[in-house]
Image (tube, rainbow, N blue to C red):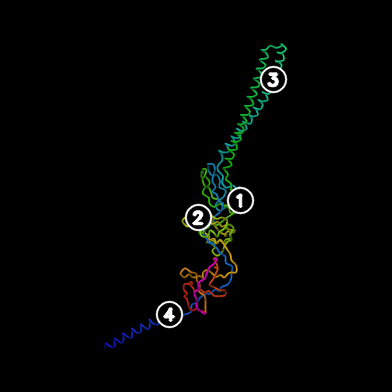
Amino acid sequence: MRRGQTLRRVVRASGKIVVLAVVAGTVVYVARFKPVAVTGFTVETATVEAEVLGTGTLEARTRTTVSTKVAGRIAALLVDQNDSVAANQPLVTIEDGELRQQVEMAKATLEATRAALARAQADISRAAAVLAQAGLDQERSRLLAEKKVATAEEFDKSRERFGIALAEMDRAKAAKTEIEYQVTASEQTLKYHQERLADTRLLSPFGNGLVLARYREVGDVVVPGTSIMDLVCLDEMWVSAWVDESALATLAVGQPAQVVFRSEPERPYAGQVKRLAKQTDRETRELLVDVQVAELPKNWSVGQRAEVHVRTASREGTLAIPPGLIVWREGRPCVFVREAGRARLREVGLGLRGRELVEITRGLRRGEVVVLAPGGGGRLREGAYLKP
């Protein structure tokens, strides 16, 4: 009885060992001998374009906040958010009744001083006539005194009258000069009030502008500096992208670029580098690169995210493969090459690196096939059998 039980135990244990051996053998076979399905890329010559990648936001090069220079109540808002505006187009009007009264008062003051100036000129003409007559009387008295016909007292009186006439002439001229200054002051005062009146009408400074935001409504009381609305100029829109400082030596104004908006990841838009910042962020070690966009998407918004690919170099007729075929082993770039139906790991040298292709400087020949297993090169191993 005990022998039977012992035999059954031995049989069961042996069965488990056999099953484990089969499983292990299957695993070994699959891992070492079962062909792996791969995708292949034939090495050919191509044009490789080196790119610098940056991420940033769409901005307008020129923007402004519309605010008033005079205090008052908003009488009218002539544009709204998202409205297009032209140069000198009225945007906002401020109540101007008091300022108009001040302009009319300044006009009246100016007219009064001009009338006073005319009277001063008449006084000068009168003083000139009196002075001329006094001069004649003085000369006549002098001649009569020399002939002993008139007394010295009469001559002295004529000379006194001439001095008084001369003083009156000087007084009239001085009065005219004073009134001329008053006219100038009145003209400047009128100009000042007219400019303040003009400041109640806020005009667009941009010829191709857009109202980005509006902060106030009709009836709101505003003071100088109060933000009423934001405007941007659409003549020059660009993406301000953050780029690692290590790429600074390869960047230059005028380089071509492609802008990819997050809203349209499959469509790149042409651009050009317009400005390189002269200050690097001390924490991220990145700097801003401003890339002007030649065309905007149908739907866009200031501040939306975008990726910028700046082309810094280009090389034609060089061996190249997609960067996704590169696998890294101990910090060295390698690829799997199909050789006699098996995968062989080979170290390669890399040159220019672009978004779609990377230059191969050594390790591959034209016509060789570089392979990649589904899920990435890490799923392949040296010597693995490959499916045809």
Query: Which callout, 2 or 4, points to the residue nearer the camera?
Result: 2
Task: Count every numbered label the image shows and give the total.
Answer: 4
The segment highlighted magenta reads: 340-352
Q: Which residue was labeled with disc 1?
A: 207
Query: Which callout, 3 or 2, points to the residue nearer the camera?
Result: 2
Left or right: 91 as drawn, with respect to 281: right
Furthest-left residue in view?
Answer: 1
Name the magenta segment's main secondary structure: strand
Which quarter of the image is occupied by the N terminus? Answer: bottom left
Residue 45, given in percent of the width and then of the height, sits at 58, 71
Residue that appears at 51% across and 54% down: 279
Place residue 93 in its image quadrant: top right
Q: Amino acid at mark 4?
A: Val
What is the distance, in whole Å, between disc 3 and disc 2 at their CAs?
A: 86 Å
Counting residues from the start of the chain, the first of labels 3 and 1 encountered is 3
Counting residues from the start of the chain, the first of labels 2 and 4 encountered is 4
Counting residues from the start of the chain, the first of labels 4 and 1 encountered is 4
Estimate how packed mark 2 is, as few (under 14), some (14 to 19) or many (20 or more) residues with alpha carbons within 10 Å: some
Estimate how packed mark 3 is, as few (under 14), some (14 to 19) or many (20 or more) residues with alpha carbons within 10 Å: some
Q: Nearer the viewer, residue 9 or 326?
A: 326
Place residue 94 in its image quadrant: top right
Counting residues from the start of the chain, the first of labels 2 and 1 encountered is 1
Q: Which mark is residue 135?
A: 3
Estimate how packed mark 4 is, as few (under 14), some (14 to 19) or many (20 or more) residues with alpha carbons within 10 Å: few
What is the distance, in whole Å, between disc 2 and disc 1 at their CAs?
A: 34 Å
Q: Amino acid at mark 2?
A: Thr
Q: Is residue 30 magenta?
A: no
Q: Amino acid at mark 3?
A: Gly
Q: Which mark is residue 28?
A: 4
Under circle 2, the secondary element is: strand
Counting residues from the start of the chain, the first of labels 3 and 2 encountered is 3
Residue that appears at 59% across and 66% down: 315
